[in-house]
Image (tube, grey):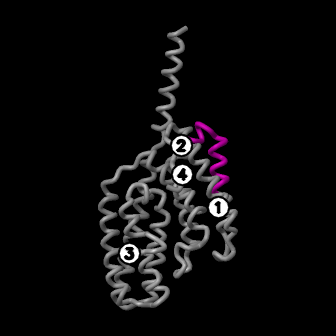
Amino acid sequence: MRQVLILVAALGFATSAALAAEVDPAPFRPYASSLIDRLAVGTERLAATVNAGDLEGAKEAWIAARIGWERGETFLAAYFPEADEAIDTWPDAAAGFHALEPLLFGAGDLEDAKPLAAALLADVGRLQSRFAEQTFDAQGLIDGLAGIAFEIGSAKATGGESPFAGTSLNDMQDNLRGIEALYALSFAPALEAQDPVLHRRIVERMMDLGAALAVPSIADLDQSRVMALSERLAGDLQEAAGKLDLEEPALGG
């Protein structure tokens, strides 16, 4: 009898260990790479248009570069915290996108924007170099996934991330697109096999959050609903981590 129990325990451990192994980060890397490329190209255009004195072009480049960043926040803060601090600090930013934002979209001050754009370009270049050497793992990706899902409601739903550019709503929508991509590419197959009910619930949560964010402007956003949906999605992703033999991601830290 004791031998049977030992065998059952061993099989249970093997099954549990296999679950984490089934979460394959590799399919996500090409998508992540495309986001870094988009960020880099957008930042190059931003610096070039600022230096050329093209205010409207600089605004367009700023918005375009932000798409790559916001969709990549599922992994950027978790794996590259120094880059996150340099590139995307808000609301009291001394550097990065949000230091440039009031100069471009508020004051129209291209002269003061020049050194900030150059510094941002250099920071993105360093991020590119580090990204090329970075390996992803299931734990880091689930941490980033749950973290940004929670942040949409806890920090961004009030509309304060990009107030001068008027793109705070876009920021959240792009965050969600990044969440959907990372989940589909790296976690959905393993979780659907392990717990199809939880998998379906996560998909439904993402759909509901997408619908809540599909409004004409930030003024039309139901902040309470977005906060609630964001928290529920993050909680479900915490539960998914346990189902996949991963540590539960911390939220709001």
Examine the rendered structure and indicate whether residue 113 appears above or below residue 87.
below
Residue highlighted by disc 4: 183
Examine the rendered structure and indicate whether residue 242 appears above or below residue 119.
above
SS assignment at label 1: helix
Residue highlighted by disc 2: 241
Query: In the rendering, at what x and y percent does residue 221 appear?
Result: 67, 71
Q: CA distance from mark 1 to mark 2?
A: 21 Å
First-in-chain label (2 vs 3): 3
Q: CA distance from mark 2 to mark 4?
A: 12 Å
First-in-chain label (3 vs 4): 3
Query: In the rendering, at what x and y percent does residue 98 appear?
Result: 45, 76
First-in-chain label (1 vs 2): 1
Residue 42 showing in the rendered view: no
Query: Within 10 angstroms of label 2, few (less than 14), some, or many (20 or more) residues?
Result: many
Q: Are marks 1 and 3 in contact (CB under 8 Å)?
A: no
Q: Left or right: where does residue 83 sit relative to residue 27?
A: left
Q: CA distance from mark 3 to mark 4?
A: 31 Å
Q: Nearer the viewer, residue 65 or 225?
A: 225
Q: Looking at the picture, which amino acid does disc 4 mark?
A: Tyr
Q: CA distance from mark 4 to mark 1?
A: 20 Å
Q: Quadrant of the N terminus?
A: top right
Query: In the rendering, at what x and y percent does residue 58 appear?
Result: 42, 84
Examine the rendered structure and indicate whether residue 105 appears above or below residue 77.
below
Q: Looking at the picture, which amino acid does disc 2 mark?
A: Ala
Residue highlighted by disc 3: 95
